[in-house]
Image (cartoon, rainbow, N blue to C red):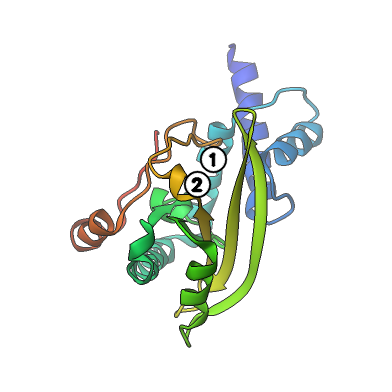
Amino acid sequence: MNSRSAGLREKVAREAATLLYFGLEKEYKQAKLKAAFNVGVHIIPRNVEVAIELDNIAEENEGASRFKRLVEMRTEALKLMKLLKTYRPLLVGSVWRGTIRHGSDIDIAVYGDDIEVASILRKQKKLTVFSVERIVVVEQGKPVPSVHIHLATWKKYNAEVVVRSIEEVGKKRFCETFGDEMRGLGIGVLEKLLKTNPTQRFVPF
C-alpha cells in the first residue's frame, strides 16, 4: 500500500469513527460505507482501524474523566456479577476492554435460566430493569437464542446482561471489531484488577 492509499484509508477510518462517536451511525459497516462516501473514495478500512481511531477520539474528547468512569463502571460490573455469581458471569465489551467512550454500557454474559436472572435483577430496589428481549442469531449455521436484559445500575450506568444457555459455557467467541477471542473477566480476576490495575486495557494494539 502506497502512502497516499494509507493516508486515505486512515482518513476514512477517522471519519467512520467520528460518525460512531457522535451517534450519527450505530454500526461499523454503515459507518465505514458512509465515511468512504463522505471522503469520496472506495476504500473501506478494517473494523480494528476504525476502533483505533474511535479510541483516539474518545481520548481527545474525554481525557482523564474517561479513566475515572471506567473504574466506576468496572466496580458496578463487579457488583452485578456478584449478584449473579451462580450464573457464571463474565464481563465483556468495552468495559472489559478498557475502551469505553461516552454512551458505552456495561456488558455482562451469564449462563442459565433467563427468568431467574431477570427476577433477581428486578428484586433489587436500586436497579431499574428497562426491558427483556429475546434474540436468535445464527452462529456457524445454527440458531443460537439468548435473552438480553437492559437495565440501569446503582450509579445509573446503562448495562446489558445477556443470558445464554448453560450449554454455551466455555464456547469460544471472536470479536467482530478486533478479531481476537472475547475472553472477558470473571469475578475473581476483575476483583483483583480493581485493586492492582483498575484501568488496564485488553486490546490487541
User: SS of the residue at dot 2?
Assistant: helix
Q: Are marks 1 and 2 in contact (CB under 8 Å)?
A: yes
Task: Identify the residue shown where x is 45% and y is 80%.
Answer: 154
Q: Residue furthest top?
A: 1
The x and y percentages for residue 59 are 47, 53
Residue sitting nearer the eye, 133 or 150: 133
User: SS of the residue at dot 1?
Assistant: helix
Q: Kindly identify the amino acid type of the residue bearing the numbered disc 1.
A: Ala
Residue sitting nearer the eye, 37 or 82: 82
Q: Is residue 29 left or right of residue 176?
A: right
Task: Identify the residue shown where x is 54% and y is 68%.
Answer: 115
The x and y percentages for residue 11 are 65, 33
Q: Kindly identify the amino acid type of the residue bearing the numbered disc 2.
A: Asp
| Image: 103 above or below 120 | above
Which labelled disc corresponds to residue 55? 2
Q: Is residue 153 left or right of residue 132?
A: left
Q: Which residue is mark 1?
A: 51
Q: Determine if residue 196 is in view.
A: yes
The x and y percentages for residue 102 are 55, 62
The x and y percentages for residue 158 are 54, 69
Quadrant in which the C terminus is drawn: top left
Quadrant in which the N terminus is drawn: top right
